[in-house]
Amino acid sequence: MARSSPSSHDHPTERLMGQSSATNALRLQLRHLAAFDTLGNPHAPTVLLLGDTGTGKGLIARILHDSGPRAAGPFLEVNCAAIPETLLEAELFGFEAGTFTDAKRTKPGLWEVASGGTLFLDEVAELPLPLQSKLLKVIEDKRVRRLGAVTERVVDVKLMAATQPELATLVQAGRFRADLYHRLSVVLLTVPPLRERQEDILVLARHFLAQYAEIGASFRFCSAAFRLIALSLTLSGSHPTTCIPASAFLTSSSPARFFSHSAIKVCCLSS
Protein backbone atom coordinates (compact mmCIF):
# COMPACT_ATOMS: atom_id res chain seq x y z
CA MET A 1 0.00 0.00 0.00
CA ALA A 2 1.34 3.43 -0.92
CA ARG A 3 2.34 5.73 1.92
CA SER A 4 1.24 9.36 1.91
CA SER A 5 4.53 10.69 3.22
CA PRO A 6 7.93 9.47 4.44
CA SER A 7 6.92 10.19 8.02
CA SER A 8 4.07 7.67 7.80
CA HIS A 9 6.68 4.92 8.17
CA ASP A 10 7.12 6.08 11.77
CA HIS A 11 3.42 5.81 12.60
CA PRO A 12 2.67 3.19 15.29
CA THR A 13 0.37 1.30 12.91
CA GLU A 14 3.43 0.41 10.84
CA ARG A 15 4.30 -2.12 13.54
CA LEU A 16 1.64 -4.32 11.96
CA MET A 17 3.51 -6.73 9.75
CA GLY A 18 2.13 -7.52 6.31
CA GLN A 19 0.47 -5.87 3.34
CA SER A 20 -2.62 -8.00 2.87
CA SER A 21 -5.95 -6.24 2.35
CA ALA A 22 -7.06 -7.29 5.85
CA THR A 23 -3.93 -5.86 7.46
CA ASN A 24 -4.13 -2.61 5.52
CA ALA A 25 -7.80 -2.25 6.47
CA LEU A 26 -6.90 -2.80 10.12
CA ARG A 27 -4.25 -0.06 9.93
CA LEU A 28 -6.80 2.40 8.58
CA GLN A 29 -9.31 1.46 11.28
CA LEU A 30 -6.74 2.05 14.02
CA ARG A 31 -5.77 5.47 12.66
CA HIS A 32 -9.42 6.42 12.38
CA LEU A 33 -10.22 5.31 15.93
CA ALA A 34 -7.22 7.12 17.41
CA ALA A 35 -8.57 10.41 16.09
CA PHE A 36 -11.69 10.09 18.29
CA ASP A 37 -9.81 10.16 21.57
CA THR A 38 -8.85 13.30 23.48
CA LEU A 39 -7.45 13.76 26.96
CA GLY A 40 -10.11 14.63 29.50
CA ASN A 41 -12.91 13.49 27.23
CA PRO A 42 -15.45 11.60 29.37
CA HIS A 43 -17.11 10.30 26.23
CA ALA A 44 -14.05 8.65 24.69
CA PRO A 45 -15.44 5.39 23.28
CA THR A 46 -14.41 2.09 24.80
CA VAL A 47 -12.99 -0.45 22.35
CA LEU A 48 -13.65 -4.19 22.46
CA LEU A 49 -11.15 -6.29 20.52
CA LEU A 50 -12.40 -9.61 19.20
CA GLY A 51 -10.23 -12.37 17.82
CA ASP A 52 -8.77 -15.83 18.22
CA THR A 53 -6.04 -16.49 20.72
CA GLY A 54 -2.67 -15.55 19.24
CA THR A 55 -3.94 -12.97 16.74
CA GLY A 56 -2.21 -10.10 18.54
CA LYS A 57 -5.00 -8.30 20.37
CA GLY A 58 -2.53 -6.98 22.94
CA LEU A 59 -0.34 -5.59 20.18
CA ILE A 60 -3.35 -3.90 18.56
CA ALA A 61 -4.34 -2.31 21.87
CA ARG A 62 -0.83 -0.95 22.33
CA ILE A 63 -0.71 0.42 18.79
CA LEU A 64 -4.06 2.15 19.27
CA HIS A 65 -2.79 3.71 22.50
CA ASP A 66 0.44 4.89 20.86
CA SER A 67 -1.46 6.33 17.89
CA GLY A 68 -3.56 8.76 19.93
CA PRO A 69 -3.16 11.68 22.32
CA ARG A 70 -2.55 9.34 25.28
CA ALA A 71 0.68 7.96 23.84
CA ALA A 72 2.78 9.79 26.45
CA GLY A 73 0.62 8.39 29.26
CA PRO A 74 0.70 4.93 30.84
CA PHE A 75 -0.45 1.79 29.09
CA LEU A 76 -1.43 -0.87 31.62
CA GLU A 77 -2.46 -4.38 30.65
CA VAL A 78 -4.29 -6.81 32.93
CA ASN A 79 -5.07 -10.43 32.14
CA CYS A 80 -8.37 -10.98 33.91
CA ALA A 81 -7.99 -14.76 33.71
CA ALA A 82 -4.58 -14.84 35.35
CA ILE A 83 -5.38 -13.14 38.68
CA PRO A 84 -7.65 -14.57 41.43
CA GLU A 85 -10.88 -12.65 42.00
CA THR A 86 -9.92 -11.24 45.42
CA LEU A 87 -6.55 -10.01 44.17
CA LEU A 88 -7.99 -8.68 40.92
CA GLU A 89 -10.37 -6.37 42.77
CA ALA A 90 -7.53 -4.89 44.82
CA GLU A 91 -5.35 -4.65 41.71
CA LEU A 92 -7.95 -2.75 39.70
CA PHE A 93 -9.41 -0.48 42.37
CA GLY A 94 -6.63 -0.18 44.95
CA PHE A 95 -7.03 -0.20 48.72
CA GLU A 96 -6.47 1.84 51.84
CA ALA A 97 -4.03 0.82 54.57
CA GLY A 98 -5.65 -1.56 57.03
CA THR A 99 -8.43 -2.67 54.69
CA PHE A 100 -7.32 -6.28 55.11
CA THR A 101 -4.58 -8.12 56.99
CA ASP A 102 -1.76 -7.61 54.48
CA ALA A 103 -2.72 -4.04 53.57
CA LYS A 104 0.17 -2.40 55.41
CA ARG A 105 0.03 0.74 53.30
CA THR A 106 -2.30 2.45 50.85
CA LYS A 107 -1.99 1.36 47.25
CA PRO A 108 -3.69 3.01 44.25
CA GLY A 109 -5.37 0.69 41.81
CA LEU A 110 -4.63 0.38 38.12
CA TRP A 111 -7.59 2.62 37.28
CA GLU A 112 -5.86 5.48 39.09
CA VAL A 113 -2.38 4.67 37.84
CA ALA A 114 -3.64 4.56 34.25
CA SER A 115 -5.20 8.03 34.45
CA GLY A 116 -4.13 10.04 31.42
CA GLY A 117 -3.45 6.81 29.56
CA THR A 118 -5.01 3.45 28.71
CA LEU A 119 -6.17 0.45 30.72
CA PHE A 120 -6.37 -2.76 28.67
CA LEU A 121 -8.38 -5.64 30.12
CA ASP A 122 -7.43 -8.84 28.34
CA GLU A 123 -9.66 -11.92 28.68
CA VAL A 124 -12.43 -9.66 29.99
CA ALA A 125 -14.93 -12.50 29.64
CA GLU A 126 -13.32 -14.08 32.70
CA LEU A 127 -14.31 -11.20 35.01
CA PRO A 128 -16.49 -12.48 37.89
CA LEU A 129 -19.99 -11.00 38.02
CA PRO A 130 -19.38 -8.93 41.20
CA LEU A 131 -16.39 -7.25 39.57
CA GLN A 132 -18.39 -6.66 36.42
CA SER A 133 -20.76 -4.50 38.46
CA LYS A 134 -17.91 -2.42 39.89
CA LEU A 135 -16.30 -2.04 36.47
CA LEU A 136 -19.59 -0.83 35.00
CA LYS A 137 -19.90 1.85 37.67
CA VAL A 138 -16.38 3.17 37.02
CA ILE A 139 -17.03 3.30 33.28
CA GLU A 140 -20.26 5.23 33.82
CA ASP A 141 -19.08 7.62 36.54
CA LYS A 142 -15.41 8.04 35.60
CA ARG A 143 -14.68 7.76 39.31
CA VAL A 144 -13.06 5.01 41.33
CA ARG A 145 -13.16 4.24 45.05
CA ARG A 146 -10.40 2.21 46.65
CA LEU A 147 -11.28 -0.72 48.87
CA GLY A 148 -11.81 0.60 52.37
CA ALA A 149 -12.13 4.23 51.23
CA VAL A 150 -15.11 6.56 51.65
CA THR A 151 -14.26 9.03 48.88
CA GLU A 152 -14.04 8.60 45.13
CA ARG A 153 -11.31 9.79 42.79
CA VAL A 154 -11.84 11.10 39.27
CA VAL A 155 -9.99 9.12 36.60
CA ASP A 156 -9.34 9.94 32.94
CA VAL A 157 -8.73 6.54 31.40
CA LYS A 158 -9.16 5.12 27.92
CA LEU A 159 -10.57 1.63 28.40
CA MET A 160 -9.93 -1.21 25.99
CA ALA A 161 -10.86 -4.84 26.46
CA ALA A 162 -10.29 -8.06 24.56
CA THR A 163 -12.03 -11.38 24.40
CA GLN A 164 -11.84 -14.58 22.44
CA PRO A 165 -15.32 -15.97 23.24
CA GLU A 166 -18.32 -14.02 22.02
CA LEU A 167 -19.56 -11.89 24.93
CA ALA A 168 -23.04 -11.77 23.45
CA THR A 169 -23.26 -15.53 23.92
CA LEU A 170 -22.13 -15.21 27.54
CA VAL A 171 -24.76 -12.51 28.09
CA GLN A 172 -27.48 -14.88 26.91
CA ALA A 173 -26.12 -17.54 29.25
CA GLY A 174 -26.23 -15.14 32.20
CA ARG A 175 -22.47 -15.19 32.67
CA PHE A 176 -21.82 -11.61 31.58
CA ARG A 177 -23.81 -8.44 32.29
CA ALA A 178 -25.67 -7.11 29.28
CA ASP A 179 -25.24 -3.48 30.36
CA LEU A 180 -21.47 -3.93 30.75
CA TYR A 181 -21.27 -5.63 27.37
CA HIS A 182 -22.94 -2.65 25.71
CA ARG A 183 -20.58 -0.25 27.53
CA LEU A 184 -17.51 -2.18 26.42
CA SER A 185 -18.62 -2.70 22.83
CA VAL A 186 -19.12 0.92 21.81
CA VAL A 187 -16.49 0.14 19.18
CA LEU A 188 -16.05 -3.47 18.07
CA LEU A 189 -12.78 -4.25 16.34
CA THR A 190 -12.14 -7.72 14.97
CA VAL A 191 -8.51 -8.80 14.59
CA PRO A 192 -8.31 -11.17 11.60
CA PRO A 193 -6.48 -14.49 12.06
CA LEU A 194 -3.52 -15.31 9.88
CA ARG A 195 -5.54 -17.84 7.90
CA GLU A 196 -7.53 -14.89 6.52
CA ARG A 197 -4.44 -12.97 5.43
CA GLN A 198 -2.14 -15.59 4.02
CA GLU A 199 -0.38 -12.98 1.90
CA ASP A 200 1.34 -11.92 5.11
CA ILE A 201 2.90 -15.30 5.88
CA LEU A 202 6.13 -14.68 3.93
CA VAL A 203 6.52 -11.19 5.37
CA LEU A 204 6.07 -12.46 8.93
CA ALA A 205 8.33 -15.46 8.42
CA ARG A 206 11.17 -13.35 7.05
CA HIS A 207 10.70 -10.83 9.87
CA PHE A 208 11.16 -13.47 12.55
CA LEU A 209 14.02 -15.17 10.75
CA ALA A 210 15.79 -11.80 10.58
CA GLN A 211 15.35 -11.46 14.34
CA TYR A 212 17.01 -14.82 14.88
CA ALA A 213 19.82 -13.77 12.55
CA GLU A 214 20.54 -10.85 14.87
CA ILE A 215 21.65 -13.30 17.57
CA GLY A 216 24.05 -15.04 15.19
CA ALA A 217 21.87 -17.88 13.95
CA SER A 218 21.17 -18.53 10.29
CA PHE A 219 17.71 -19.80 9.37
CA ARG A 220 15.78 -20.46 6.23
CA PHE A 221 12.35 -21.80 5.33
CA CYS A 222 12.23 -24.74 2.98
CA SER A 223 9.62 -24.63 0.21
CA ALA A 224 7.83 -27.64 1.66
CA ALA A 225 7.36 -25.80 4.95
CA PHE A 226 5.62 -22.91 3.21
CA ARG A 227 3.28 -25.30 1.42
CA LEU A 228 2.42 -27.00 4.71
CA ILE A 229 1.76 -23.66 6.43
CA ALA A 230 -0.54 -22.48 3.62
CA LEU A 231 -2.39 -25.80 3.57
CA SER A 232 -2.84 -25.99 7.34
CA LEU A 233 -4.26 -22.47 7.52
CA THR A 234 -6.94 -23.22 4.93
CA LEU A 235 -8.22 -26.34 6.68
CA SER A 236 -11.65 -26.00 8.23
CA GLY A 237 -11.36 -25.01 11.88
CA SER A 238 -7.59 -24.69 11.80
CA HIS A 239 -5.95 -22.13 14.04
CA PRO A 240 -2.59 -20.41 13.52
CA THR A 241 -1.28 -21.11 17.02
CA THR A 242 -1.95 -24.82 16.81
CA CYS A 243 -1.83 -25.87 13.17
CA ILE A 244 1.30 -24.25 11.79
CA PRO A 245 3.68 -27.19 11.31
CA ALA A 246 7.37 -27.33 12.04
CA SER A 247 8.72 -24.99 9.44
CA ALA A 248 12.33 -23.90 9.56
CA PHE A 249 15.77 -25.37 9.13
CA LEU A 250 18.99 -24.19 10.72
CA THR A 251 21.65 -23.76 8.05
CA SER A 252 25.25 -23.77 9.18
CA SER A 253 28.22 -26.08 9.17
CA SER A 254 26.32 -28.26 11.61
CA PRO A 255 23.59 -30.65 10.43
CA ALA A 256 20.24 -29.00 9.64
CA ARG A 257 17.72 -29.09 12.46
CA PHE A 258 13.94 -28.95 12.29
CA PHE A 259 12.23 -26.12 14.19
CA SER A 260 8.63 -26.10 15.37
CA HIS A 261 6.17 -23.23 14.97
CA SER A 262 6.61 -22.38 18.67
CA ALA A 263 10.22 -21.43 17.97
CA ILE A 264 9.42 -19.27 14.97
CA LYS A 265 6.09 -17.84 16.19
CA VAL A 266 4.91 -17.15 12.67
CA CYS A 267 1.34 -17.00 13.94
CA CYS A 268 1.87 -13.64 15.63
CA LEU A 269 1.23 -10.20 14.15
CA SER A 270 4.55 -8.98 15.42
CA SER A 271 7.11 -9.73 18.06
Image (cartoon, rainbow, N blue to C red):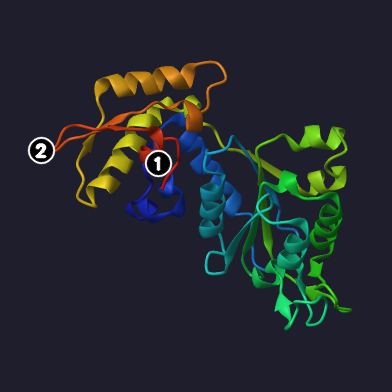
Q: Look at mark 2 in the image and give the residue it sits on.
A: 253
User: Where on the picture, by quarter, is residue 256?
Assistant: top left
User: Can you identify the residue that label 1 sits on?
Assistant: 17
- Examine the rendering and report whether any part of residue 210 can be seen: yes
Q: Judging from the image, what secondary structure is the residue with disc 1 in?
A: loop
Quadrant that contains the N terminus = top left
The residue at the point 86 percent across, 33 percent down is: 172
User: Based on the displayed image, in which of its 4 quarters is residue 199 positioned?
Assistant: top left
Residue situated furthest left in the rendering: 253
Amino acid at circle 1: Met
Please name the residue shown 57% across and 51% down the image: 61
Taking 195 as reference, is 38 left or right?
right
Above or below — where is 230 with respect to 147?
above
Q: Which secondary structure lies at badge 2?
A: loop
Left or right, 244 with reference to 128: left
Say which amino acid is labelled 2: Ser
Q: Which residue is drawn at 47% across and 25% down?
A: 243
Q: Is residue 183 above or below residue 249?
A: below
Q: Picture coordinates of residue 39 (x, y %)?
A: 65, 67
In this rendering, which labeled residue sits more in front, label 1 or label 2? Answer: 2
